[in-house]
Amino acid sequence: MDRYPTVRREGDKGLAVGLAVVALVLAFILAAPLILPFDPEAMSPEFILAPPSLEHWGGTDNLGRDILIRTLMGARSTLTLALASTLVGVGLGALIGMIAGYRRGLMDKLSMRLADAVMALPSLVLAMLALVVFGNGPVAVLGSIAIVFVPRAARIMRSVVLDLATRDFVVAASIVGESQASILLREILPNMWPNLLVEACLRFSYAILLISSLGYLGIGVQPPTPDWGLMIADSSAYITTAPWMVVWPAAGIVASVVTVNLIGDRLQERFAAWRRGRMSHV
C-alpha cells in the first residue's frame, strides 16, 4: 500500500509536465532551422520592426532580423552555457564539499571560510569580477558562473556528507578497513545524488538568469551570437513601438526558469517521500 499517494501522484504529474515541456522546447530549438528558414544574423531593411506575421511569426527587430529564430538560437547558447556552468560549478563544489565534510580538520575549516568569503559577494557582482579576469566570450561566462556556484554547492554538499558520515553503513565500512576514497565513492556519493540533482536544478535556473543578466549588461556573450539578455537590451528603446522584440526573449527566460524550478521542486518532493519510506523500514 502506498503510504504517500497524494504526494507521489502530484509529484509524478508535475515532474511529467516539466519533462514534457523541456522535451518539446528542445525539439523545437533543434528543429528551428528547418521550420524557420531564416539566418538569425541576416538583416532585411524592408522588414525593419515588422510586427508578427505569417512570414515572420515573431516579428523582426530594428535591423530586420527575425525575432523568433534569434530567440531559438539564443536558447541554444544560453541553455548550453547554463548547463555547462552548472555541471562544472556544482560538480567541483560537490567534490570539495565531500572531501571537506568527510575528512574535516584544517581543510574543512579553510575551504568553508573561503566559501563564506566568496558567498558574501552578490552573485552578479562576483560573476562580473570574474569576467574582468577571464575576459568576454562563452568560455569566460562559463567559468565566471561556475565560480559563483562552487562555494554554494560545496557548503550544501558538506552538510549532506556530515549527516551521512554518522550513518551505520558508513561507520561499518570504516571499521572493516575501507579507504576514505572507497567510502566516499561507494557509500556516500550514491546516497547524496538526490541532493546533488535538486541542487543542480536550482543552479541551472539561476545560471539562466545570470547569463541573461550579463548579456543585458553587455559583458556576457558578445554579438553576433544571439543571446536572450542581449536581445532584451537591444529592445529597450523599442518597448512601446515594437514590444514583440522584448516579449519573445523574456518569455524564453521565464519559461525556462519556471520549468526547471518545477522539475526541481517535484524531484525534491519525490526524494523526501522516498527518504520517509526508507526511514519507516529502519
Image (cartoon, rainbow, N blue to C red):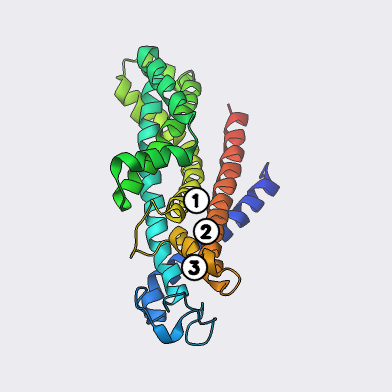
Q: Position of residue 62 (x, y in %)?
A: 46, 75
| Residues under numbered marks 2 and 1 in contact, where contact means CB atoms less than 8 Å apart | yes
Asked where in the image residue 16 lies, by quadrant, the reply is bottom right
The alpha-carbon separation of the residues under discs 3 and 2 comes to 16 Å
Which dot marks residue 24? Answer: 3
- Dot 2: element: helix
Q: Nearer the viewer, mark 3 or mark 2?
A: 2
Q: Which residue is mark 2?
A: 253
| Residues under numbered marks 3 and 2 in contact, where contact means CB atoms less than 8 Å apart | no
Residue at 58% x, 60% y is 17
Which dot marks residue 209? Answer: 1
Residue 191 seen in the figure: no
- Dot 1: element: helix
Task: Tell me if residue 106 comes above or below residue 111 in the rendering.
Answer: above
175 or 227, which is in the foreground? Answer: 227
Sequence-wise, the earlier of marks 2 and 1 is 1
The alpha-carbon separation of the residues under discs 3 and 1 comes to 21 Å
Residue count near mark 1 (Cα–Cα under 10 Å), binned few <14, some 14–19, many ≥20:
many
Give the amino acid at mark 3.
Leu
Give the amino acid at mark 1.
Leu
101 or 9, which is in the foreground? Answer: 101
Sequence-wise, the earlier of marks 3 and 2 is 3
